[in-house]
Every structure is written in structure tokens, then in C-alpha cells.
Image (cartoon, coloured by chain):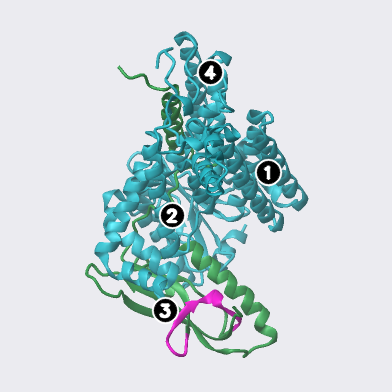
Amino acid sequence: MPVARPTVWLSVCVLLGYAVTSRVVEDLYPFSTFSMYAQHGGTAVSRIVARTADGRVHPVRAFVDWSCDGALDLSPARCGEPGSFDYTGYLDAEDAAHLEAAHLEAHHAPGVGEPVEIVRRVWKLGEVAGPPGIEDCPLHRCRARLASP
Amino acid sequence: MSGSPDRGRSESPYQGCSRAPLRVVLGLVGMMDAVVLGGTVARAGGLSEEAPRLLRWLAGAPAAALGVAGVAVLALVAFVRGVRPLLAGAVALVALGWLVETVAALEEGPKRNFFLSGAMLLGWLAGLVYARGLGPEMGRPVRRVLPEEIFAEAGAAAALAATYVNGALSKLLTGGWGWTDGVALRALVVTSTLHAEGEGWLAAYGRVVVEQPLLAQALAGAALLIQLGSVFLLVNARMRVLWGTLLLGFHLNVLLLTGIHYGSAMVLLLAWSYPWPRLVGWLGGRRRRGAGNGAGDDAGDDAGNGAGNGAGNGAGEEAGDPPLVGVEPARQRRVRLGMVGAALVVLGGLGAMRMAGGLGGQLRAAEGGTAGHARGEALNRVGPLAVGDALPGGFRIARLERGPEDIAIHLVQASDGHAAATLRLKPSPTGVDRGPFDAGTAELLYDRGAQVSLEALLPAGRDVARRVREAAGGPDTAPMVATWMATR
């Protein structure tokens, strides 16, 4: 009969102990369930993007010196019924924070840069092969300058 | 698992070699984490009153944050040098934990890329504790191979495997096998890359994955199986090489597709998965032989690693680990029972705290502060919400509380009155609801200690958000919510 190494007992205990403790505490350093990409989500997903005059989209953080029409309102409710598409909360918040900061700074020098639209782009992922369907929900007309690389 | 000595074989690619390089890599990764975390906390602008006092204090004191990071680094230097590694590792773990939890409070969510080094450090320390519990008779050092570090390495490897198994289990528990249909992966890629018409092979690869559901399904299935199969890291040296390579491939693919990188994990996987001392020794031997000095045969003694024997010759008795089990079974049983008992006590305590209403709330209560969520002003009605209102999904509003930071909406199961979750409503600092319910420019979040899944809570949360939007006459809900919070 083969002799198991004592490290096997230790390995099993650490593996199970970590897994069980993580389920109890969820995320308490150094334990975690690592559930960050566990959600299945829907087939319609969205992101706030900057759309330039040629129709191309870029991350809003690719632009600086934003100057937009009116107070910024990026809420998903402007683009459809709740639940009709998904959005990533922290990404939206990061984009909103960038726009807010840049928008406030740009008040002293409005009208700099090229015309850029802030839109919420919704991608609809189909079950068959092919590009996803796209719907753009315009949110604000702005001017902004492409950030230096 | 009796008291019979094993024959020097192990499940490690480092068999017969010192584990010091692993200790060094683990310590260095921890130091990098400490520096980044310390810098993040030091630059932060402070935390709100509802955060636990220890975290709030650290976030408001840049010098202290840098000091805690410094303590972590110094402790890890001692750990790397092998000076009282158990104490040094424990101090580093506490300091890193303080920083990680502060960053989690600042960014309203844990930064999991810092957890892996901590988990492996904990596994390493568990191995040391177990080895020392067995006593000095457990094994003698041979060629700089410390028996206690054989256990430490095994413990760290098990923690490494556990993190990936946990990732897979979370996917299965949340989405079931349906997660492997590839939709989640395609959604992640499309929102990370904007599905832009960029040029180059990388953009093309991303587009192919998004546009080919079968390919996405295959990649998602492979990712889940690779994570779930991480237990194979613990089987033997060859399986560790194989599975470590698969996990590195998984990380590389995620990096290429989304730009999301887990650098610490990749470094630790690289270190733990391959027989580096043998590879380095083998390369050194080849170089010396190439130089014509015939020194390659001596490489086996170089650095005490038996490195020149090469990985392919079976690494038999002369290159094996020292025999480990030389203690009587009764002593083993006592050590094991002691460790299991200690783990159960800790688990039981944590579980009881969770059952009593969430770990965060318990930590706040334990501080004796008055800023806990459960100490707001009780109300019968707030705007369109009233105590007793039925909500979709079988919930009922049991309590409404107006606190200094938010309005707490306590939900219970309508069927049995058991606490289910607490929703928290407040004007969003960013003008966007970061929660899943879409409350406009206000924020409607749910407690991490919720007793029900988000899926079960969604209908109720969305109904609350809808009522708030309707009361505000549109998505600009923040001013109305601020009014509700201010009304006394």
C-alpha cells in the first residue's frame, strides 16, 4: 500500500479550509470567493463612450478638456427601461468621474477641441455568429480634445 | 500517513532543491503589493463616518498608511531572509490586510488582485505551523532543503489552487453551467474593448471572440475547467507544470482579450509551477560544458540544489527531498486535531458574526461607535416608500431608517418575516447609480451581508428604484433623495 506524504494532509486542509472560510466571509483579506466575473448577465450590454464625427467610438478617458451642454446626466434610465440592458457600475462611475472632473476644469476654456458626443452604446450579442447589434443612446453634445498619447 | 518515513518524493517541481527561491518570490510580490497599497491609501482623501474606525483613521493619515506599508515591507524582508519567518509573515499579513481592507472601503469593493499573495502567505505560514507542531524529529535538513519549508511550499500551493477553485465555484454557484455559454465572456470583452474597429491582430482576436459564440463558449468552458482543475497543481510535479502552464495561458488570454491583468498571480504561478533551480542548473552546466571546462558534473552540488542532475533523469534518491515522517502517529494526530480545532473555532466565530447581521456591521458594532447603519432615525414613510409595503419577489419593507449617510430600507421575506437584505439610498457622489437597480442620479445599493442572492433581490430593488424615479419625475433623483434625507 503506497505511503501518502504528510504534505497531502496539509494541502487538503488548506485547500478546503480556504474554500470554506471564503464562503463564510466572502471577501475578507486574504480570503475571497473571487466572484468578480461570476455573473452571467444579459445579452445586451452597454458602456458610456465618446463618439466622434466620423462615427468611431473611443473610451471617454481618451479625451480631455470636455465641455458639454448642460449638467451631466449619464444615468442608464435615459436609455431605456431598467433591465433592458446591462451596464458595469464601476466602469460607468469611473467614466462619470473623469467627465465630471474634466467638465469642471473646462468651464474656464469652453469650446476647445473637436465635436464629440457622449453616448451610451448598447451591444446586443446574438446567438449566431456575426457582429453584435449596436444601438447608440445620445446623452450629451460636447467638445473635447484627444489626449496626448 | 503513518509514521513511516516517505522515500524523498514530493509533489513539487522543487523536489530535492531549496525552497528559498519560492520564499523570496512570495516576499517580493508581497512587498510590491504593500508599496502599491500604501501609496493608494496615502493619496486617498479619507473615508466617511460609516467606515470602521481603524480603516477611517488609516485613510485619513497618509504618513500612517506609508508606515503600515513600511512595516509590511520590513516584515517581508525578514521573511525573505528567513529571520523568524512565522512571526514576520504574520506581521506582514496583518499589515497587508489592514491596507487591503482600507483600499476596499475607499473603492467600495475589494481589489482581488492583491489577495493572492496574502492567501499564499497564509498557506506558507500554515505549513510552517504544521511542520513545527510535528517537532524536530519530523525531518532533518538535507542539502539546504529545510523540511519545514517543504510543508510551507505545499501549504502555499494549496492556497494558490484554492483561489482558482473558488473562482470557478463562484461562477457555478451564481450562473451554473450556463456561465459557459460564452455570453459573459463576450460581454466582458465588448465592454472592455468597445468592440472598436481597431487594427492589428489583438483587436481582430477580440472581435472574433465576440462575433463567434461557439469560440467564446469554448474559451469560457476551458477557463472554467482550468480553474476548477487547479487541484491538479497538488498532485505531482508534472501535473503542476501542466496545470500551471494552463493557468498562465488562461491569464494571458484574459489579458489579451480584456486588458485585465493579474500580474502578481502570473509571477507566483511562474515561480511555483516550474523546476527553476534544475533548469538554471542545467543551463549553467551546459554553459560551462560549452566553455570546455568540464564543470557541468559538479553542478549538482552547486547551491546545494542537486541542480545539475537535470529534470529529466528522474531525480531519484540522491536528488529527493529529505524523508519527512519520523514522528509517532499520536503526535501527528494531536497536531492535526489542534489545527483543525483552531480552524473550526475561527470559522464558527466568523459564521456566527455573519449570521448575526453581516461582518461589516459586527466590526462597526464591536468598535462601540454610533455610526453603524442600524442607528438611524426610524420612519414610517420616506417619499413613495412605507413600512409594510409589499415588493416584487416576495419581500416586504420592515423598517425605514434615516441616517446621516443614507436612507436604509430593511427588507424581510414576506412569507416568514426573516431578514433578507438592506437597501441603501443616497445621492450618488458621481451622478450615476453604481448599483444594479437604476435609481437615476441617486444610488441604491444593497448590503454585502444580504441573506438572498442579487438575482432574487433584483425585482424588489428595481421596484424601489422605479418608485424613486417616479417620485422625482425622472432620472434626476438625487435632489429629491437629498430632501428626504434632510427632512426632520
From the viewer's perspective, tell me whether residue B130 is left or right of residue B49.
left
> Which of the two labelled residues, at mark 2 and mark 1, occupies the earlier sequence position?
1
Q: Are marks 4 and 3 in contact (CB under 8 Å)?
A: no
Q: Three-letter amino acid code at disc 2?
A: His
Q: Nearer the viewer, mark 3 or mark 1?
A: 3
Identify residue for label 1.
Answer: B53
Q: Chain A is drawn in which colour?
A: green
Q: Nearer the viewer, mark 4 or mark 1?
A: 4
Residue A57 magenta: yes
| Of residues B241 and B269, the one drawn nearer to the viewer in this rendering | B241
In the rendered structure, which segment of residues is drawn in magenta?
A: A52-67
CA gap between label 4 and label 1 equals 46 Å
Identify residue for label 2.
Answer: B251
> Which of the two labelled residues, at mark 3 and mark 1, occupies the earlier sequence position?
1
Q: Mark 3 lies on which chain?
A: B
> Which of the two labelled residues, at mark 4 and mark 3, occupies the earlier sequence position?
4
Quadrant in the picture for the C terminus of chain B: bottom right
For residue A124, which quarter of the picture? bottom left
Q: Which chain carries label 4?
A: B
Identify residue for label 4.
Answer: B139
CA gap between label 3 and label 2 equals 23 Å
Across and down, in percent, residue B31 comes to: 65, 46
**Residue at disc 3, secondary structure:** loop
Q: Three-letter amino acid code at disc 3?
A: Glu
Q: Three-letter amino acid code at disc 1?
A: Arg
> Which of the two labelled residues, at mark 4 and mark 1, occupies the earlier sequence position?
1
Across and down, in percent, residue B64 comes to: 75, 47
Identify residue for label 3.
Answer: B199
